[in-house]
Image: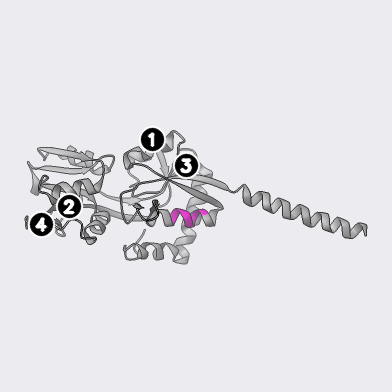
């Protein structure tokens, strides 16, 4: 009887330990943006942030043993929110640029692309580089790598900074802006939705700023970075990343 009692107590102890462990699973706050489809966007039906980078960080968390709480915020506030501990991870359409690497750390590469160029549909010129738009007023999203890169060329009469990519699309659509620069896959996705019928994505344009989207973590948070990289590598090997990319119309491409 004593032995049976000990076995029962041991079983109860294991069950309680497992329950406590499950309830104590680490919850990490993830910064994502309400604009930036297909990487991240606000689903108005559910009022939640959805997209490729949300699916990816959720899958990584499931594999690595943490759950995620997605925090919607403007793109320009992501890095500051991470460094001030308001969030723990950035999972958005953020390129791992040299300037950003001085402030935060990044995971291994997720997806590589460059900027796209949009102009009014009435403008049929086959632009290939920024030089073709010398002296014009162009726009780009604040906080992205494109704003500074465009300003440094010294080619433009003005480089307007916009809060969101849809804002750029609207001004090009109405003819208030000669041209706009933004992430190519996000522009392509927006135009496929048909909301900006007077805008054309210039297929002849060759991007000057090519970068890689990666997941951001705080400097020195090596344990979390290692967990993310290990799970990301597993998702690449199993084909899960390719499936996520394909789901969001990026053709299964990825680094």
- Numbered label attached to residue 121: 4
Q: Which of marks 2 and 3 is nearer the N terminus?
A: 3
Q: Nearer the viewer, mark 4 or mark 2?
A: 4
* Residue 211 location (% of width, % of height): 30, 50
Which residues lie in the magenta part? 56-61
User: Disc 1 and disc 2: Cα gap in Å?
Assistant: 28 Å
Q: Mark 1 points at which residue?
A: 80
Q: Is residue 183 visible?
A: yes
The local secondary structure at tag 1 comes to helix
Q: Earlier in the sequence, mark 1 or mark 3?
A: 1
* Along the line of sight, the residue nearer the viewer: 27 or 145: 27
User: Disc 4 and disc 3: Cα gap in Å?
Assistant: 42 Å
121 lies above or below 178: below
* Residue 110 location (% of width, % of height): 38, 55
Q: Mark 2 points at which residue?
A: 117
Q: Name the residue under label 3.
A: 88
The structure residue drawn at horizontal position 25% and vertical position 52%, both measured from the top left corner, is 114
User: Disc 4 and disc 2: Cα gap in Å?
Assistant: 12 Å
Q: In which quarter of the image is residue 103?
A: top left
The structure residue drawn at horizontal position 69% and vertical position 53%, both measured from the top left corner, is 18
User: Disc 2 and disc 3: Cα gap in Å?
Assistant: 33 Å
Q: Which of marks 1 and 2 is nearer the N terminus?
A: 1
The local secondary structure at tag 4 comes to loop
Q: Outermost residue, right direction?
A: 1
Q: Main secondary structure of the magenta part?
A: helix
Q: Nearer the viewer, mark 4 or mark 3?
A: 4
Q: Earlier in the sequence, mark 4 or mark 3?
A: 3
- Disc 4: CA contacts within 10 A as few (<14), some (14-19) or many (>=20): some
The structure residue drawn at horizontal position 34% and vertical position 63%, both measured from the top left corner, is 253
Q: In which quarter of the image is residue 135?
A: top left
């Amino acid at each position: 009887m004593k032995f049976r009692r000990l076995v029962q107590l041991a079983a109860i102890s294991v069950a309680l330990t497992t329950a406590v462990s499950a309830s104590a699973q680490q919850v990490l706050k993830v910064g994502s943006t309400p604009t930036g489809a297909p990487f991240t966007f606000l689903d108005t039906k559910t009022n939640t942030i959805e997209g490729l980078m949300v699916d990816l960080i959720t899958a990584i968390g499931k594999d690595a043993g943490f759950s995620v709480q997605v925090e919607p915020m403007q793109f320009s506030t992501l890095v500051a929110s991470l460094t001030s501990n308001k969030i723990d991870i950035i999972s958005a359409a953020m390129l791992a640029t040299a300037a950003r690497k001085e402030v935060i750390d990044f995971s291994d590469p997720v997806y590589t692309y460059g900027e796209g160029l949009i102009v009014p549909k009435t403008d049929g010129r086959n632009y290939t580089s920024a030089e073709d738009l010398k002296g014009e007023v162009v726009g780009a999203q604040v906080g992205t790598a494109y704003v500074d890169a465009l300003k440094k060329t010294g080619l433009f009469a003005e480089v307007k900074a916009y809060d969101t990519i849809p804002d750029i699309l609207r001004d090009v659509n109405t003819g208030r802006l000669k041209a706009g620069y933004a992430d190519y896959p996000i522009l392509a996705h927006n135009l496929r939705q048909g909301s900006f019928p007077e805008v054309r994505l210039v297929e002849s344009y060759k991007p000057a700023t090519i970068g890689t989207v990666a997941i951001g973590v705080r400097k020195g948070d090596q344990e979390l970075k290692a967990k993310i990289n290990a799970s990301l590598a597993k998702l690449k090997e199993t084909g899960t990343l390719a499936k996520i990319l394909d789901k969001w119309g990026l053709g299964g491409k990825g680094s």
